[in-house]
Amino acid sequence: MAFRWKNDLTPADVTPEGMWLNRRQVMAGVAAGSILGPSVAGAQDTTLEPNSFEDITNYNNFYEFGTGKDDPAREAHRLTTTGWEITVDGLVDNPGTYSVGELIAGLTEESRIYRFRCVEAWSMVIPWNGVELKDILDRVGVQSGAKYVAFETAVRPDEMPGVRFPTLDWPYREGLRLDEAMHPLTLMATGIYGKPMPNQNGAPIRLVVPWKYGFKSIKSIVRITLTDQEPFTSWNNANSREYGFYSNVNPNVDHPRWSQASERKIGGGLFARREPTLMFNGYEDEVAGLYDGMDLSKFF
Ligand SMILES: Nc1nc2c(c(=O)[nH]1)N[C@H]1C(S)=C(S)[C@@H](COP(=O)(O)O)O[C@H]1N2
Ligand SMILES: [Mo]
Protein backbone atom coordinates (compact mmCIF):
# COMPACT_ATOMS: atom_id res chain seq x y z
CA MET A 1 0.00 0.00 0.00
CA ALA A 2 1.08 3.56 -0.57
CA PHE A 3 2.37 5.49 2.38
CA ARG A 4 0.32 8.40 3.45
CA TRP A 5 1.98 11.72 3.80
CA LYS A 6 1.44 15.44 3.73
CA ASN A 7 -1.65 16.64 5.50
CA ASP A 8 -3.49 13.35 5.59
CA LEU A 9 -1.84 12.30 8.84
CA THR A 10 -2.69 14.39 11.85
CA PRO A 11 -1.47 14.24 15.45
CA ALA A 12 -4.63 12.25 16.19
CA ASP A 13 -3.30 9.52 13.89
CA VAL A 14 -0.22 9.09 16.00
CA THR A 15 -0.68 6.69 18.86
CA PRO A 16 0.36 8.70 21.92
CA GLU A 17 3.41 7.32 23.64
CA GLY A 18 1.59 6.02 26.71
CA MET A 19 -1.18 4.55 24.60
CA TRP A 20 1.36 2.80 22.42
CA LEU A 21 2.99 1.06 25.37
CA ASN A 22 -0.43 0.05 26.63
CA ARG A 23 -1.32 -1.17 23.25
CA ARG A 24 1.62 -3.51 22.98
CA GLN A 25 0.70 -5.03 26.32
CA VAL A 26 -2.91 -5.36 25.27
CA MET A 27 -2.01 -6.92 21.95
CA ALA A 28 0.06 -9.51 23.75
CA GLY A 29 -2.95 -10.62 25.72
CA VAL A 30 -6.60 -9.82 25.20
CA ALA A 31 -8.17 -9.17 21.83
CA ALA A 32 -7.92 -5.67 20.41
CA GLY A 33 -10.93 -3.41 20.89
CA SER A 34 -11.97 0.20 21.08
CA ILE A 35 -9.88 0.73 24.21
CA LEU A 36 -6.87 0.81 21.94
CA GLY A 37 -7.55 4.42 21.07
CA PRO A 38 -6.24 6.19 17.98
CA SER A 39 -3.83 4.24 15.87
CA VAL A 40 -1.66 4.99 12.93
CA ALA A 41 -3.34 5.52 9.60
CA GLY A 42 -2.42 2.69 7.28
CA ALA A 43 -1.80 0.37 10.20
CA GLN A 44 -2.33 -2.68 7.99
CA ASP A 45 1.27 -2.04 7.10
CA THR A 46 2.77 -2.92 10.46
CA THR A 47 6.04 -1.25 9.55
CA LEU A 48 4.24 2.09 9.89
CA GLU A 49 3.74 1.61 13.63
CA PRO A 50 5.82 4.40 15.14
CA ASN A 51 8.77 3.44 17.27
CA SER A 52 8.55 4.42 20.91
CA PHE A 53 9.92 7.78 22.04
CA GLU A 54 12.44 5.75 24.01
CA ASP A 55 13.77 3.92 20.95
CA ILE A 56 13.86 7.11 18.90
CA THR A 57 15.89 8.95 21.53
CA ASN A 58 18.26 6.19 22.67
CA TYR A 59 19.51 4.66 19.42
CA ASN A 60 21.04 7.49 17.43
CA ASN A 61 23.74 8.47 14.99
CA PHE A 62 25.15 11.89 15.85
CA TYR A 63 28.90 11.60 15.57
CA GLU A 64 29.47 15.04 17.11
CA PHE A 65 28.61 13.28 20.38
CA GLY A 66 30.46 10.03 19.69
CA THR A 67 30.13 7.09 17.33
CA GLY A 68 28.25 4.73 19.68
CA LYS A 69 24.47 4.44 19.30
CA ASP A 70 24.04 5.39 22.94
CA ASP A 71 26.60 8.23 22.97
CA PRO A 72 24.17 10.94 21.74
CA ALA A 73 21.58 10.10 24.43
CA ARG A 74 24.28 10.36 27.08
CA GLU A 75 26.23 13.37 25.78
CA ALA A 76 23.85 15.59 23.81
CA HIS A 77 22.46 17.34 26.90
CA ARG A 78 25.65 19.45 26.66
CA LEU A 79 24.33 21.20 23.55
CA THR A 80 22.82 24.63 24.28
CA THR A 81 20.05 25.37 21.81
CA THR A 82 18.64 28.63 23.19
CA GLY A 83 19.24 31.61 20.91
CA TRP A 84 20.08 29.25 18.03
CA GLU A 85 20.83 31.06 14.79
CA ILE A 86 20.99 29.89 11.20
CA THR A 87 22.94 31.69 8.51
CA VAL A 88 21.28 31.62 5.10
CA ASP A 89 23.58 32.64 2.27
CA GLY A 90 24.59 32.09 -1.34
CA LEU A 91 22.07 32.54 -4.15
CA VAL A 92 19.19 33.97 -2.10
CA ASP A 93 17.36 37.29 -2.17
CA ASN A 94 17.35 37.66 1.62
CA PRO A 95 20.66 36.39 2.98
CA GLY A 96 21.21 36.81 6.68
CA THR A 97 21.45 35.24 10.09
CA TYR A 98 18.05 34.30 11.44
CA SER A 99 16.73 32.83 14.65
CA VAL A 100 14.83 29.56 14.22
CA GLY A 101 11.69 31.48 15.19
CA GLU A 102 12.21 34.02 12.41
CA LEU A 103 12.72 31.28 9.83
CA ILE A 104 9.63 29.25 10.68
CA ALA A 105 7.16 31.75 12.21
CA GLY A 106 3.81 31.58 10.49
CA LEU A 107 4.66 28.57 8.34
CA THR A 108 2.25 25.62 8.39
CA GLU A 109 3.28 23.17 11.09
CA GLU A 110 3.20 19.59 9.84
CA SER A 111 2.88 16.34 11.84
CA ARG A 112 3.97 13.43 9.72
CA ILE A 113 4.93 9.84 10.32
CA TYR A 114 7.90 8.87 8.16
CA ARG A 115 9.72 5.61 7.78
CA PHE A 116 13.41 6.30 8.37
CA ARG A 117 16.11 4.03 6.92
CA CYS A 118 19.76 4.06 7.98
CA VAL A 119 22.44 2.86 5.57
CA GLU A 120 23.44 0.40 8.32
CA ALA A 121 20.29 -1.55 7.34
CA TRP A 122 18.07 -0.73 10.30
CA SER A 123 14.95 1.37 10.24
CA MET A 124 12.54 3.21 12.50
CA VAL A 125 9.19 4.90 12.05
CA ILE A 126 9.20 8.40 13.50
CA PRO A 127 6.37 10.91 14.04
CA TRP A 128 7.99 14.24 13.16
CA ASN A 129 6.78 17.79 13.63
CA GLY A 130 8.17 20.54 11.49
CA VAL A 131 7.74 22.67 8.39
CA GLU A 132 8.39 22.00 4.75
CA LEU A 133 11.88 23.08 3.73
CA LYS A 134 10.25 24.57 0.63
CA ASP A 135 8.38 27.10 2.77
CA ILE A 136 11.64 28.26 4.38
CA LEU A 137 13.35 28.49 0.99
CA ASP A 138 10.44 30.47 -0.45
CA ARG A 139 10.72 32.83 2.49
CA VAL A 140 14.42 33.57 1.89
CA GLY A 141 13.93 33.79 -1.88
CA VAL A 142 15.86 31.30 -4.00
CA GLN A 143 17.55 32.98 -6.98
CA SER A 144 17.24 31.54 -10.46
CA GLY A 145 20.86 30.36 -10.70
CA ALA A 146 20.57 28.12 -7.60
CA LYS A 147 20.69 24.38 -8.29
CA TYR A 148 21.57 22.88 -4.89
CA VAL A 149 21.11 23.48 -1.18
CA ALA A 150 24.02 22.88 1.19
CA PHE A 151 23.63 22.42 4.96
CA GLU A 152 26.06 22.57 7.88
CA THR A 153 25.82 21.41 11.49
CA ALA A 154 27.23 23.37 14.43
CA VAL A 155 30.77 22.58 15.56
CA ARG A 156 31.21 23.22 19.27
CA PRO A 157 34.15 21.39 20.82
CA ASP A 158 33.09 22.57 24.29
CA GLU A 159 29.67 20.97 23.91
CA MET A 160 30.29 18.22 21.38
CA PRO A 161 32.92 15.78 22.61
CA GLY A 162 32.97 13.92 19.27
CA VAL A 163 34.29 16.87 17.24
CA ARG A 164 37.56 16.77 19.17
CA PHE A 165 38.37 13.69 17.09
CA PRO A 166 38.74 13.64 13.29
CA THR A 167 36.01 11.01 12.77
CA LEU A 168 34.64 13.23 9.99
CA ASP A 169 35.92 16.46 8.44
CA TRP A 170 33.82 18.80 10.63
CA PRO A 171 31.44 20.50 10.29
CA TYR A 172 29.06 17.73 9.26
CA ARG A 173 27.81 18.82 5.85
CA GLU A 174 25.06 17.60 3.54
CA GLY A 175 23.35 18.71 0.37
CA LEU A 176 20.31 18.23 -1.82
CA ARG A 177 19.51 19.09 -5.39
CA LEU A 178 17.09 22.04 -5.40
CA ASP A 179 14.15 19.96 -6.67
CA GLU A 180 14.73 17.41 -3.88
CA ALA A 181 14.86 20.25 -1.36
CA MET A 182 11.62 21.75 -2.70
CA HIS A 183 9.78 18.40 -2.66
CA PRO A 184 6.81 18.46 -0.25
CA LEU A 185 8.09 15.35 1.57
CA THR A 186 11.26 17.18 2.65
CA LEU A 187 10.86 18.53 6.17
CA MET A 188 12.79 20.76 8.50
CA ALA A 189 11.82 19.02 11.71
CA THR A 190 11.57 20.74 15.07
CA GLY A 191 10.05 17.97 17.16
CA ILE A 192 9.10 14.32 17.67
CA TYR A 193 5.79 13.05 19.08
CA GLY A 194 4.72 16.67 19.44
CA LYS A 195 7.56 17.39 21.86
CA PRO A 196 10.44 19.77 21.12
CA MET A 197 13.28 18.07 19.23
CA PRO A 198 15.46 16.11 21.66
CA ASN A 199 19.12 17.18 21.40
CA GLN A 200 20.24 13.71 20.33
CA ASN A 201 17.84 13.88 17.37
CA GLY A 202 19.17 17.23 16.15
CA ALA A 203 17.73 20.11 18.19
CA PRO A 204 16.57 22.66 17.54
CA ILE A 205 16.05 21.97 13.82
CA ARG A 206 17.16 19.23 11.44
CA LEU A 207 16.48 18.01 7.95
CA VAL A 208 14.31 14.93 7.24
CA VAL A 209 14.39 13.42 3.73
CA PRO A 210 12.43 10.17 4.02
CA TRP A 211 13.39 8.55 0.70
CA LYS A 212 17.12 8.86 1.37
CA TYR A 213 19.41 7.09 3.81
CA GLY A 214 19.37 8.64 7.27
CA PHE A 215 22.74 10.31 6.99
CA LYS A 216 21.32 12.85 4.50
CA SER A 217 19.05 14.10 7.31
CA ILE A 218 21.55 16.49 8.87
CA LYS A 219 21.02 17.58 12.47
CA SER A 220 21.36 20.82 14.44
CA ILE A 221 21.71 23.00 11.35
CA VAL A 222 23.49 26.38 11.53
CA ARG A 223 23.95 27.17 7.85
CA ILE A 224 21.90 26.82 4.67
CA THR A 225 23.60 27.84 1.42
CA LEU A 226 22.02 28.03 -2.03
CA THR A 227 24.58 27.24 -4.68
CA ASP A 228 25.04 26.31 -8.34
CA GLN A 229 27.63 23.62 -7.49
CA GLU A 230 27.02 20.11 -6.13
CA PRO A 231 27.80 20.57 -2.41
CA PHE A 232 30.48 18.86 -0.36
CA THR A 233 28.91 16.09 1.72
CA SER A 234 30.60 14.60 4.76
CA TRP A 235 30.06 10.93 4.02
CA ASN A 236 30.97 11.21 0.36
CA ASN A 237 34.16 12.95 1.46
CA ALA A 238 34.87 10.26 4.06
CA ASN A 239 34.33 7.38 1.63
CA SER A 240 33.18 8.15 -1.90
CA ARG A 241 32.98 4.48 -2.85
CA GLU A 242 30.42 3.77 -0.13
CA TYR A 243 28.45 7.03 -0.05
CA GLY A 244 27.33 8.90 -3.15
CA PHE A 245 25.76 12.35 -3.33
CA TYR A 246 22.25 11.04 -4.00
CA SER A 247 22.04 8.35 -1.32
CA ASN A 248 18.52 7.28 -2.26
CA VAL A 249 17.30 4.20 -0.43
CA ASN A 250 17.77 1.55 -3.11
CA PRO A 251 17.58 -2.17 -2.31
CA ASN A 252 19.24 -2.91 -5.66
CA VAL A 253 22.44 -1.02 -4.91
CA ASP A 254 24.38 -2.72 -2.14
CA HIS A 255 26.63 -0.83 0.19
CA PRO A 256 30.07 -2.22 -0.74
CA ARG A 257 30.32 -4.01 2.61
CA TRP A 258 26.75 -5.25 3.08
CA SER A 259 23.41 -5.76 1.36
CA GLN A 260 20.67 -3.12 1.31
CA ALA A 261 17.97 -5.60 0.28
CA SER A 262 16.44 -5.97 3.75
CA GLU A 263 16.26 -4.11 7.03
CA ARG A 264 15.65 -4.67 10.72
CA LYS A 265 13.20 -2.40 12.46
CA ILE A 266 14.60 -1.14 15.74
CA GLY A 267 12.56 -2.15 18.76
CA GLY A 268 11.21 -5.30 17.16
CA GLY A 269 12.98 -7.51 19.68
CA LEU A 270 15.57 -10.20 19.26
CA PHE A 271 13.52 -12.40 16.96
CA ALA A 272 12.05 -9.70 14.74
CA ARG A 273 12.15 -10.77 11.14
CA ARG A 274 14.00 -8.65 8.61
CA GLU A 275 11.77 -6.86 6.15
CA PRO A 276 12.47 -6.30 2.47
CA THR A 277 13.67 -2.77 1.80
CA LEU A 278 11.42 -0.78 -0.51
CA MET A 279 12.66 1.33 -3.40
CA PHE A 280 13.01 4.97 -2.26
CA ASN A 281 12.11 3.67 1.20
CA GLY A 282 8.48 3.24 0.11
CA TYR A 283 8.07 6.75 -1.34
CA GLU A 284 8.57 5.64 -4.94
CA ASP A 285 5.23 6.97 -6.20
CA GLU A 286 6.05 10.41 -4.87
CA VAL A 287 9.73 10.82 -5.76
CA ALA A 288 10.75 8.46 -8.58
CA GLY A 289 9.99 11.22 -11.10
CA LEU A 290 12.84 13.31 -9.68
CA TYR A 291 15.28 10.75 -11.08
CA ASP A 292 13.76 9.99 -14.49
CA GLY A 293 16.45 9.10 -16.96
CA MET A 294 19.21 8.80 -14.35
CA ASP A 295 21.17 5.59 -13.93
CA LEU A 296 20.67 5.06 -10.20
CA SER A 297 23.50 2.56 -9.94
CA LYS A 298 25.82 5.32 -11.16
CA PHE A 299 24.15 8.13 -9.19
CA PHE A 300 23.88 6.21 -5.93
N1 LIG B 1 25.17 16.46 12.30
C1 LIG B 1 24.90 15.17 12.13
N2 LIG B 1 23.74 14.82 11.52
C2 LIG B 1 23.47 13.50 11.34
C3 LIG B 1 24.38 12.50 11.75
C4 LIG B 1 25.58 12.92 12.40
O1 LIG B 1 26.43 12.10 12.80
N3 LIG B 1 25.78 14.25 12.57
N4 LIG B 1 24.08 11.16 11.54
C5 LIG B 1 23.15 10.87 10.43
C6 LIG B 1 22.75 9.45 10.40
S1 LIG B 1 23.89 8.33 9.83
C7 LIG B 1 21.49 9.05 10.74
S2 LIG B 1 20.99 7.43 10.52
C8 LIG B 1 20.50 10.01 11.31
C9 LIG B 1 19.98 9.50 12.63
O2 LIG B 1 18.94 10.32 13.09
P1 LIG B 1 18.20 9.97 14.48
O3 LIG B 1 19.28 9.77 15.49
O4 LIG B 1 17.32 11.14 14.77
O5 LIG B 1 17.42 8.72 14.24
O6 LIG B 1 21.07 11.31 11.52
C10 LIG B 1 21.91 11.76 10.49
N5 LIG B 1 22.28 13.15 10.74
MO1 LIG C 1 22.70 6.40 9.27
Image: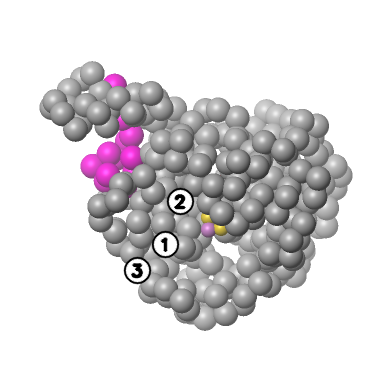
Identified at 80% across, 32% down, the residue is 83
Sequence-earlier tag: 1 or 2:
2
Residue 226 appears in the picture as rendered: no
CA gap, disc 3 and disc 1: 8 Å
Amino acid at pointer 1: Ala
CA gap, disc 2 and disc 3: 15 Å
Amino acid at pointer 2: Phe
CA gap, disc 1 and disc 2: 10 Å
Q: Where is residue 124 in the image (x, y as percent from the top left)?
A: 42, 48
Q: In the picture provided, is 186 more to the left or to the right than 105?
A: left
Mark 1 secondary-structure assignment: loop
Quarter location, residue 104: top right
Q: In the picture provided, is 217 more to the left or to the right than 153?
A: left
Give the extent of the magenta segment. Answer: 37-49
Identified at 66% across, 49% down, the residue is 65
Q: Which mark is residue 121?
A: 1
According to the image, label 3 marks what residue? 261
Q: Where is residue 241 in the image (x, y as percent from the top left)?
A: 57, 80
Residue 42 belongs to the span the image colors magenta: yes
According to the image, label 2 marks what residue? 116
Neighbourhood count class around disc 3 (C-alpha, 10 Å): few under 14, some 14–19, many 20 upward: some
Residue 222 belongs to the span the image colors magenta: no
Query: Main SS of the magenta segment?
Result: loop
Residue 233 appears in the picture as rendered: yes
Q: In the picture provided, is 139 more to the left or to the right than 247?
A: right
Identified at 67% across, 28% down, the residue is 106
Mark 2 secondary-structure assignment: strand
